[in-house]
Image: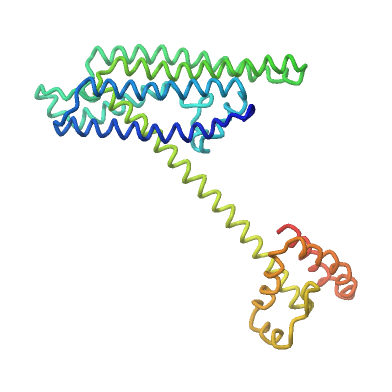
Amino acid sequence: MSGGFNFTGFYATWFDHLRHLIHQLSSTTTAAKENRSSTTDDLRHLVHTVMSHYNDYYHVKSLAAERDPLSVFNAPWATSLERSLHWIAGWRPTTTFHLIYSESSILFESRIVDILHGLRTGDLGDLSPSQFCHVSELQCQTVEEENAITDELSEWQDNVSELIGTRTELTGKVEGLVSIIKKADDLRLRTVQKVVELLTPKQAVEFLIAAAELQFGVRGWGLNQDRERSNNRDADSTSNRMVALLVAALVLWEADVSLGIRRLSTKEMKMASMGVDVHIGVLSQEAQRPCHLRASMAILLPSAVGIESSCPSRALKWVIVHKLICEI
């Protein structure tokens, strides 16, 4: 990121601290269930701490967007899976309500017998009619704002052709993207803050834990998928190198040449009839020095083609080997 600011590094540190805070919330919830010391004030303090942590994130992200909005919009700190779920460089604000409704339904069903007997659990499964009403109203407001920001981004993208104009016009357009990112982040933060205000401290703790666990889960899945893709690419690259060496070894076996390094001994030639391990070994030693290998091939190729001009198929194989080796 420009200006020497590394938001990706900040995010990694911020994310680790979020895990620590959520662990504190979970420990406090467990203590409350076991009737250990855990007061409403303690819960309220922890909720405030977590919300301050989210506020810090969006504040720093806002500064990063001012420095390099295109990089922030691309969200390089996120995994491929996370980016596929993004709405303007982050999660969609209305996801908050899907989370509340799903968590409330799960808890309600698990405690329905107690609730029918008039026992109040005080958790997210025990939302009051008034709370549901306020959550529904907030959802409608959030949908309207979310759609308005989406339309603003769409308009910005429709006018992207103007970016090829003067430098002044380019700067103005980029500043427009900064404004859109800030509006999206502001809506995200305000949505969570308003939801937390509608909940009791205990419910707020459960909501924040559920939201963070969803975030941890998606990021974990994304990291695993990115890691698997990276490993597959490395495996494919290694496989391509081995194929190139194998083809080269087979050609050398036919041509009885070892890239100008040395000829195979009589003993090695006898061993070669059992396979191509000898030739692969010779090539593998040189493969550790790709520059020398390419130079050897460049020198040897013309003479090899000339010598084997009476055998076009063998000359063609030399050309193939040269191409493969140079691509290793």
Q: Nearer the viewer, residue 254 or 77?
A: 77
Percent x, y of residue 72: 57, 27
- Quadrant for the N terminus in the image: top right
Hey, which residue is sitting farthest left in the picture? 117
- Does residue 109 lie above or below 172 as drawn? below
Q: How many marks?
A: 0
Is the residue 291 above or below the residue 211 in the image? below
Q: Position of residue 50 (x, y in %)?
A: 36, 25
Tell me the quarter of the picture where residue 171 sits: top right
Which residue appears farthest toward the front when viewing the image? Answer: 4
Instruction: Tell me where residue 118 appears, x and y as whole percent.
Output: 10, 21
The reply to whether residue 324 is visible in this rendering is: no
* Residue in view at x 24 percent, y 23 percent: 42
The percent coordinates of residue 169 (x first, y second) are 73, 14
Q: Is residue 250 left or right of residue 82?
A: right
Question: Residue 34 is drawn in which quadrant?
Answer: top left
**Residue 248 vs residue 205: left or right?**
right
Point 70% across, 74% down: residue: 282
Q: Is residue 286 above or below residue 22?
A: below
What colour scheme does the image use? rainbow
Q: What residue lies at 78% left-to-right and 62% top-to-bottom?
A: 294
- Residue at image point 27% right, 20% down: 44
Asked whether residue 240 is in view, the answer is yes
Quarter the C terminus occupies: bottom right
